[in-house]
Amino acid sequence: MNTKIIIKSALKRGVIGVGIGMPIALAIFFIIYFSIAAATGGQNPEMNNIAYMAKLCLSFFLTCFIFASSTIVYQIEKLPLAFATAIHFTAIFACWMFCAWLGDWIGGAWHSWLIAVGTFILIYIIAWLSIVRSQKKKAAAITEKLKNNQ
């Protein structure tokens, strides 16, 4: 796979990720926001702030784009799986941290950031392990079909 094809494919994945991820992310955000507002009887005044909403939308856009486009590293055959995973993790972790800072998603105390980082790593590991397990099952099924056809 040459560099031009990789970049084109990554951009295509990013655009698809934004097209699918943005509406989902915004829907989840507003469902949670309005549920909390209804339960507490109050509203966040920042929701009326255009700059805050622009940062929020930019954060969602970047997150959807980077999360989707970074999966291209797994299509590069020359990269070992561990290296591809390290690149993928670094890309989405950096994006997530930047967006968390930009959108002020996490409170200012250092331990809040530490909890957020630990949660992110835990969720990444769980997602990665479940995907690897799923792929191994698919590979085993394909291998079994090939054995039966011979």
Image: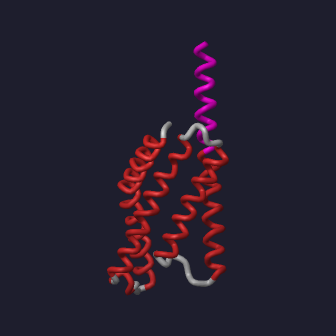
Is 29 displayed left or right of 120 in the figure? Answer: left
Task: Name the quadrant of the C terminus.
Answer: top right
Q: Is residue 98 above or below residue 22?
A: below
Q: Is residue 134 left or right of residue 3?
A: right
Residue drawn 61% across the image and 42% down it: 79
Indicate how the structure is coloured in the image.
secondary structure
Total marks drawn? 0
x, y percent for residue 15: 37, 52
Dominant secondary structure, magenta: helix
Name the side, left or right, on which 45 lies relative to 91.
left
Q: Relative to residue 145, is residue 15 depicted above or below?
A: below
Q: Is residue 117 above or below residue 77?
A: below
Residue placed furthest toward the front? 3
Q: Which residues are magenta?
A: 132-150
Tell me what residue is drawn at x 53 percent, y 66 percent: 96
Image location (x, y in percent) of residue 7:
44, 47
Residue 55 location, x and y as percent?
Answer: 40, 74
Please check the rendered image and state whether residue 144 is part of the magenta-colored stretch, yes or no. yes
Pick the front one: 123 or 41: 123
- Residue at 38 percent of width and 79 percent of height: 52
Task: Return the x and y of residue 13 as percentages of the image width and height.
Answer: 42, 48
Residue sitting at x 48%, y 38%: 2
Residue 48 lies in quadrant: bottom left
In which quarter of the view is residue 113 placed?
Answer: bottom right
